[in-house]
Image (cartoon, rainbow, N blue to C red):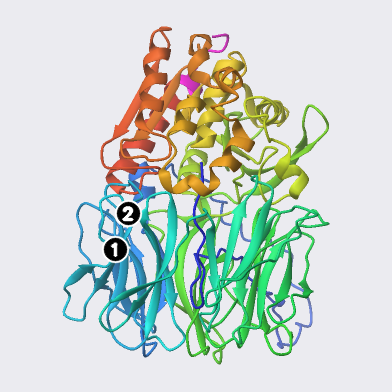
Amino acid sequence: MRASSRFRPHGFRLHIFVSSLALVFGLGACSSDAPAPAAAPAATAPAPAAPAVARPSQQYSIEDFVETVAVSGASFSSDESRILFSSNRTGIWNVYEMPVAGGEWKSITASTTDNNYAVAFFPADDRRLITRDQGGNELNHLYVIEADGSEKDLTPGDKLRAQFGGFSRDGAHFFVIHNGRDPRFFDLYRYSSSDYSTEMLFENTEGYEIGALSADQQHLALSKSITTNESSLFVRNLQSGELREVSNPQQRAQVSDQDFSRDSAWLYYTTNEGSEFMRLRRFSLADGSHEEVQAADWDIVASYFSHNGKYRATVVNVDGSTQVELYDAATGVAKKLPALPSGEIRGLQIARSEQRMAFYVNGDRQPNDLYVLDFNAAEPTRLTTSLNPKIDAADLVETEVVRFKSFDGMEVPNILWKPQQASADNRLPAIVWVHGGPGGQTTRAYNPVLQYLANNGYVVLGINNRGSSGYGKSFFAADDGKHGREPLWDCIEAKKYLQSLPYVDPDRIGIAGGSYGGYMTLAALAFHPDEFDVGVNIFGVSNWLRTLENIPPYWESAREALYQEIGNPNTQREFLIETSPLFHADKIKKPLMVLQGANDPRVIQAESDDIVEAVRKNGVPVEYVLFDDEGHGFSKKANQIRGYGAMLAFLDQHLKGKVVGN
């Protein structure tokens, strides 16, 4: 389940996931200038070709996959000679910096308990901003690391959740949203970069989601969710208090602010009003007029300007992959970039000088690696090599986009991980893997858990059932009020699709997923107990009534939209009981594994405790792995090894080792 307050004032972007520009190498034919002999010698047999290496050359352990180093985030130092980033190299996420030319990492934090994540260098000096929560409870605070290494909490409070919002154009201030005044709503604050004194810029008493702030700090984008498919967008004048609606109240649609132009004259936003996919428009602050800017055959998911407005980057979600386009903002002409490494580009950050950018490259066989590209250079500089050297990337699999027709003819897209050892002569067990959400999307990218399963002999179909994002607004809305039914029926059709593949063992197919995908796993076992052979539920909802009545207070602005999507516990109790697996747990008769973080604020521990207790009463094999130092996701290496290693052992015993006929 997802809900968040979006905040993107000038100079700040959440991690933007954009795909790579393909780099294609052509090899020319070799030739020789030596003269031909007068007479050809007798024909001889060609030298035998080296035998092809059978793939995978070996099966790797979960320790091998977890040993791969994860890296994320990128912020340039004031002189742009260093990069600030985060990594789990020690087993816990900590903050590091390194030269943009490459070299040794310098530790900025050295936690052995809670994860620390890089936020940004200060624009004029070596102070750094970082963030962390407590054991995965998602109550992130913002901290400053002073030049002498001392640390200060800039957002103290036991129940407070804070998010950084970027620096002002001159660097004299930075912006933060937090819910310290009211745990339900986020207010906007301006902090002095010199002494950290604060001033409230916007008191949010009506449950808006805070968006972009104009460069002149005079206008703030605000939005409200009506449903998960419809929203309203406004611009507030912070001096006069005037509130103008940008969205069209006569034709509701998804509308999302993106960025203000650097002259503070236009608000750029995306909308699917009148179309299936999100396109880019802009709103004039002077006269309220709208202009079309850019459209694509898929969703434009982000568009934003560099620090001084020289460039505008646009990100498009293309059938489970993403692509980035960079434009000269003044002329609209696309900037021709040098050839970049294969895979998707992620976490794109253009430096304040607009002379270089940092980004991550991520592909099916390659975890995140950090690069820096000087716009005047021919090639980018690679700063990290993350894949565990023990793993041969050729042993990993390339994903494939596949589609099938569901029970009512609706086409359902999927991402397929086909093990290299799979064949008609070696049919393998398979898993339908359901993403989180509702409304998430399984995409093409490096996924260590699914690569681990594929390497160890499991076909994985990452289903994008109806209700998934990325495939148009009609497909996205097709699950509203239907959870536990039509989206679940898509998963059953996914099983039938897998059974049609010649390399899949039709009698050994399970279902698994996290968060909403965990709910779908439980729903499949409870509502269709004969369809799947096993289920792996990773922090999934078992009781919608309890979950919807106990959402975190800072989700208040999305509460009604969630009720519209899933059901209202005040008026639709019987429906929610009908669609909650816990109340039908007596029907579950297939082996079940459950993984849960004790500090999860979204799907609380009781959701897993109760389903485990109920299913065990059926005499069904149930394995339960509980982490006391994790939340909605498992971030620590030791826990990943324990949890996902246990998952493979469970699948090997109950799916791969299943006696056909049971």
Residue placed under numbered mark 1 in the picture: 155
Please give the residue where the numbered disc 2 appears in the rendered image. Answer: 160
Instruction: Answer whether labels 1 and 2 touch (C-beta < 8 Å).
Output: yes
The residue drawn where x is 78% and y is 65% is: 296
- The residue nearer to you, when weighing 428 against 282, is 282
Figure label count: 2
Assess disc 2: are there few (<14), some (14-19) or many (≥20) residues with their C-alpha within 10 Å of its C-alpha. Answer: some
Identity of the amino acid at label 1? Thr
Query: Which mark is first along the chain, 2 or 1?
Result: 1
Callout 1: helix, strand or loop? loop
- Residue 427: x and y in percent read 61, 28
Q: Is residue 156 left or right of residue 489?
A: left
Q: Which residues are magenta?
A: 654-662
Q: Where residue 406 appears, x then y in whole percent?
A: 77, 31
Residue 600 shown left or right of residue 126 in the figure:
right
Name the residue located 43 percent from the left edge and 62 percent from the top edge: 187
Asked whether, in this view, residue 38 is left or right of residue 360, the answer is right
